[in-house]
Amino acid sequence: MIGAGMGAMAAAARLAVAGHRVTVYERAETYGGAVTRFERDGFAFDTGPGLLPLPAVYRDLFLKTGKQPLEEAVELVQVDPASRHVFPDGTDVLLPNASRAGTVDALNTALGSGAGDHWGDFLVRAREAWDRTRRPLLEEPLWKDWRVLGEREPYPAVPHKRLLRTRRASTLDEIAAWELRDPRLTALLDAHALAYGLDPRTTPASAAVLPYMEHAFGTWYVRGGIRELARAVYERCLARRVEFVFGTEVTGIVEKDGRAAGLELADKTVTEADHVVAGVDPVRLSGLTEHVLREDGDARPERMSPSSGRFTVLLALRGRRESGAAHRTVVHAPDRTAELDHLCRPAGSEEPARPTVTVLRPDDPALRPDDEHESVVLSAAAPVAPAGAAGWAAGDTADDRFADLLVSAAEAAVPGLRERLLWREVRTPGHSARETGAEGGAVPPPALAAADGRFLHPANTTRFPGLYLVGGWAHPGGGLPHAGMSGALVAGLIVEGQDFRGSQ
């Protein structure tokens, strides 16, 4: 197995339980892929995902791989309120966790009568899109006839009184303009796309499933940070006798009798295998084999374009976290067009616009030296550099300029932020590129239906017999739940073969 990301480890544990001997080769010195942690002076920070949607995926993993349930391996905490939103006009609203009625009431009170009702109606339609795509885009191997998923927009048509007919939105942008009709609700919808680096102007309407997932299944935090989830999955793999070899670069996939039969390592060592599972992005994978992996008619081999990364600022603050502070605050951008235009241009190509900033302030003693200090994580979608370009470089003044924009935005969420600041650590998509190997540090979004298949990821199987793809760059795409499901799908395909029809 190549890579020790969350999807690869999920597959490894399941395969080991099924009787396979599994060895994982990881170029870094630790496990988890993008689920990493930074520690300094008694402060600790999640530098990848900070919250866990749809924890049922990992509950199922622990159920299927041993007697210890997930809740005995980590402490899951439901985040309530789910989020606070600060809009450019000064409007401020707290949204409850997993409550449609509560969300409608909160939005009606904060934004004006009718606004919450528009959002509530949108969630009902988003559920239809979720019901139509949940199985094929999360729980089943990618259909051979994947074009069907690309042709059909699962988000329902909406009656239009003036036109006396229905019309079907094709993008999130059209949902916002036709159905939400409030710039603050548009910003609320945009934030769910931007969390994955997606431009709502071109993202299909089927992405309505992203806010629906959070609404339906809640927002969860892992006590000690999301890195604790990676630790738990890693330890489950060890308990099932999965072997890990860290600090080892895979340089090639060995072919024998027309199938993947092992790996070549940087020291020229060759290891044999009955199956090879690759948890790497398509660019890196293409350098490991000359074998044709896909042909016309297969799922698209490349990631979606443009692809974006995550820019993160870690703040060490003096002073006690105030009582009642929201775990997550989203400070929305003052100029939507400028933000989205900047996201679509190569990194470093122009002066950045102030982005939508997510501020995470977990009330967790494990992340701070004592109760008189606080660790805070700021994050925003950021452009990545094209192949061969410099992009985000360590110590670049562009890094500091963009970081300053995030800190300025966060002042709306953290009282007295600048006076409390001890130090900050800036992490750009360049850090992610070096740590995960993903070109430019891009972050893979979940697979989405419609848009002619442009938002689908490569299937877990390939034309190279014996080679399987796992993790965020393969079906069903990025995000912790989707990565975990990719592990379940790959394990099912290897254990049950072509008869495997998906997770139950």
Image (spheres, rainbow, N blue to C red):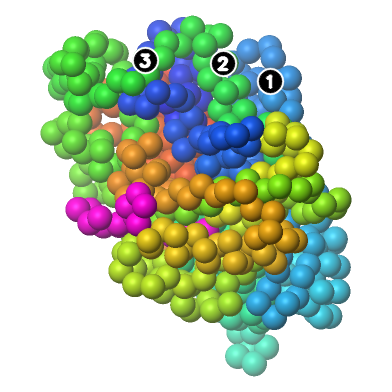
Residue under the image location 74 percent in, 28 percent down: 75
Q: Residues within 10 Å of mark 3 (few under 14, many from 20)?
A: some
Please name whichever residue, 204 or 185, is drawn nearer the observer in this view of the structure: 185
Q: Which numbered circle lies on residue 73?
A: 1
Q: Which residue is mark 3?
A: 245
Determine the CA span between mark 3 and mark 1. 23 Å
| Amino acid found under the numbered disc labelled 2 | Glu
Q: Residues within 10 Å of mark 1 (few under 14, many from 20)?
A: some
Q: How far across and down, in percent of the image, does residue 382 sit?
A: 44, 60
Residue under the image location 64 percent in, 32 percent down: 42
* Label 3 or label 2, whichever comes before in sequence order: 2
Q: Which residue is mark 2?
A: 235
Q: How far across and down, in percent of the image, does residue 233 sit?
A: 56, 22
Instruction: Say whether residue 79 is left or right of residue 135.
Output: right
Reply above or below: 243 against 70.
above
Q: Is residue 394 visible?
A: yes
Q: Secondary structure at mark 3?
A: strand
| Amino acid found under the numbered disc labelled 1 | Ala
| Amino acid found under the numbered disc labelled 3 | Val
Examine the structure image and report whether residue 387 is included in the region drawn in magenta: yes
Determine the CA span between mark 2 and mark 1. 9 Å
Q: Are marks 2 and 1 in contact (CB under 8 Å)?
A: yes
Q: Quadrant of the N terminus?
A: top left
* Label 2 or label 1, whichever comes before in sequence order: 1
Residue extent of the magenta highlight: 380-396
Residue under the image location 40 percent in, 8 percent down: 21
Examine the structure image and report whether residue 304 is included in the region drawn in magenta: no
